[in-house]
Image (cartoon, rainbow, N blue to C red):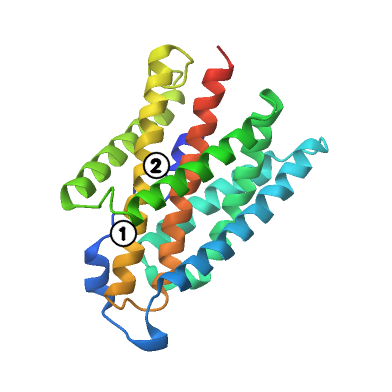
Amino acid sequence: MTDGVIGLIGRSGNPTLNERTFERTGQQSGQDAMTINGTVNKAFITLAILLGGAFSTWSMYFEDRNVASYAITGAIVGFVLALIISFRPTAAPFLVPVYALFEGLFLGALSANYQSLYNGITLQASLLTIGVFLALLLAYKLRLIQATRNFRLGIFAATGGIAIMYLLSFVLGMFGVTIPYLHDNSLLGIGISLVIVVVAALNLVLDFDFIESGAKQGAPKYMEWYGAFGLMVTLVWLYIELLRLLSKLRSR
């Protein structure tokens, strides 16, 4: 399974981050309702767990210990949990922390591998991810960019197309066939990576809108974990795509 497919875990199968979600979950009030602050707190908890798992496999990698089994287990378990969470939001409070841990195991091993090839690349990708997140959050808060219906449809279509392309690349790769330009460091390959980074980044706007809409509509409290999950999936995908883009640029 390629890192690109893993980066799309949950996102390609998670079109539930829209108004239909709230129609299914109903409305709550008071302490039983979803809030923006509650979602932010859950997102920080999820990020802390993910970083804990990532640092563990990162450390083992540079201690010359075999982390392949941890990376594969993290990828597979993370994939399964992401699918369950996407279609059963009520399970989010219990499964999101577990998902974060296993996704962290995979992400730490992946990051360490890139770091061994291109010194400093993980710090660059991390800073860029944070920068993009803050810039889009500010643009969203100032209403410079809004998640209109057409915007949502365009991002969902682009994200789904990327997911299909990665899945096709994975399947064809098992037969020794590669999709031209997707993984190479040619100018076209770099351009493709740049487009994917932009699409991944714009998914953050959908996450912001989902969280804000959930709080306004009084979604159940467990949706805070669901919102944190969607935000984490997007950030992980964006970080991985930035790693891929930077590695292409560094390898030229």
**As drawn, 25 above or below 208:** below
**As drawn, 4 above or below 193:** below
What's the distance in space between the residues labelled 2 and 1, CA to CA? 14 Å
Residue sitting at x 26%, y 60%: 18
* Screen quadrant of the C terminus: top right
Residue sitting at x 46%, y 42%: 132
Comparing 137 with 51, the one in front is: 137
- What's the mark number on residue 209? 1
Residue sitting at x 71%, y 48%: 55
Q: Amino acid at mark 1?
A: Asp
Residue 101 locus on image (x, y percent): 61, 57
Residue sitting at x 48%, y 50%: 79
Taking the image as shown, residue 18 lies to the left or right of residue 183, namely: left
Residue 229 locus on image (x, y percent): 45, 60
Is tag 2's residue or tag 1's residue first in the polypeptide sequence? 2
Residue 116 locus on image (x, y percent): 71, 27
Q: Secondary structure at mark 1?
A: helix
Taking the image as shown, residue 149 lies to the left or right of residue 31, namely: left
Taking the image as shown, residue 84 lies to the left or right of residue 102, namely: left
From this viewpoint, which residue is outermost toward the front?
142
Comparing 235 with 8, the one in front is: 235
Comparing 137 with 15, the one in front is: 137
Q: Which residue is mark 2?
A: 201
Q: Amino acid at mark 2?
A: Ala
